[in-house]
């Protein structure tokens, strides 16, 4: 083969390669040659999870105080000095309940402040969460959204999770528009994909305000032995 022919073949190959790279870069579903480095910050979700646990503990203490107060009231009915004892009991109960209510209000305000601090752009930035926070939100019946393709979802998913494949995002835009934008949504895919991140930010830009990205996704959830469908 002559040098001229070799140059011609090389030129065609180089031109084809450049066209392919240009097409890939201009395609929204392009193949990434070098994966973008993903920086995951769990600090905010850890703080919110701690606040959630404290709030649950305070509510349990409130229930215990109420039960204890009721038992004490029944016992005081047997005492001769009922009027004095009832007055003391009422004052003690009101003071205890007020302290619990004040604690609940304080924790609720902290959670609201954390959500406000997340609003650093024109939209509310989604929050990265670990599996323990995801399980806590699942137990409280918050909505999970599976961003994987339909066959993956049908093969297994978090119970009651809504399947909205990110690769068909525009097809499901009308469905998303019909969802309340001020509720909590947990977005996940699998451990080896990033479409949950893309889905969460796309929804945030639509006006959704409480987006949580569960990075461990379906693989970590199933490995933990949590409920599945």
Image (cartoon, rainbow, N blue to C red):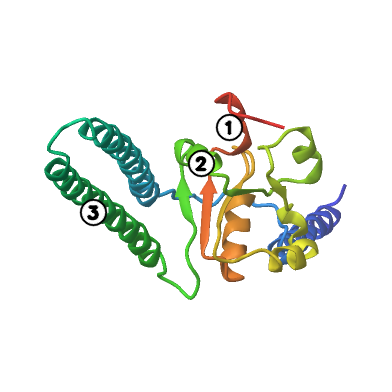
Residue furthest toward the bottom?
Answer: 122
Q: Residues within 10 Å of mark 2 (few under 14, many from 20)?
A: many
Dot 1 alpha-carbon crowd within 10 angstroms: few under 14, some 14 to 19, many 20 or more = many
Percent coordinates x, y for residue 115 in the rendering: 40, 62
From the image, state whether disc 1 or disc 3 is nearer to you.
Answer: 3
* Residue topped by disc 2: 134
Q: Secondary structure at mark 1?
A: helix
| Residue displayed at 83% across by 54% down | 9
Mark 2–mark 1 CB contact (< 8 Å): yes
Tell me the quarter of the picture where residue 205 sits: bottom right
Determine contact: label 1, label 3, CB under 8 Å. Answer: no
Q: Residue furthest front?
A: 80
Q: Earlier in the sequence, mark 2 or mark 1?
A: 2
Q: Nearer the viewer, mark 3 or mark 2?
A: 3
**Residue 60: x, y in percent?**
35, 38
How many numbered marks does the figure carry?
Answer: 3
């Amino acid at each position: 083969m002559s040098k001229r022919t070799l140059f011609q073949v090389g030129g065609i190959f180089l031109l084809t390669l450049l066209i392919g790279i240009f097409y890939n870069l201009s395609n929204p579903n392009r193949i990434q040659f070098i994966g973008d480095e993903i920086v995951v910050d769990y600090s905010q979700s850890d703080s919110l999870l701690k606040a959630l646990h404290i709030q649950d503990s305070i509510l349990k203490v409130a229930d215990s105080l109420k039960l204890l107060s009721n038992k004490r009231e029944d016992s005081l009915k047997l005492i001769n000095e009922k009027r004095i004892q009832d007055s003391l009991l009422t004052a003690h109960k009101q003071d205890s309940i007020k302290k619990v209510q004040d604690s609940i209000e304080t924790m609720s305000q902290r959670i609201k402040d954390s959500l406000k601090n997340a609003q650093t752009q024109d939209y509310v930035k989604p929050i990265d969460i670990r599996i323990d926070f995801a399980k806590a939100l699942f137990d409280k019946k918050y909505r999970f959204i599976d961003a994987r393709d339909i066959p993956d979802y049908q093969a297994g998913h978090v119970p009651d999770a809504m399947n909205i494949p990110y690769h068909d995002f525009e097809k499901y835009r009308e469905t998303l528009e019909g969802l309340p934008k001020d509720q909590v949504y947990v977005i996940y895919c699998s451990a080896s994909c990033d479409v949950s991140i893309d889905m969460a930010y796309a929804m945030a830009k639509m006006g959704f305000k409480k987006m949580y990205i569960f990075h461990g996704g379906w693989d970590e959830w199933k490995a933990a032995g949590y409920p599945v469908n």
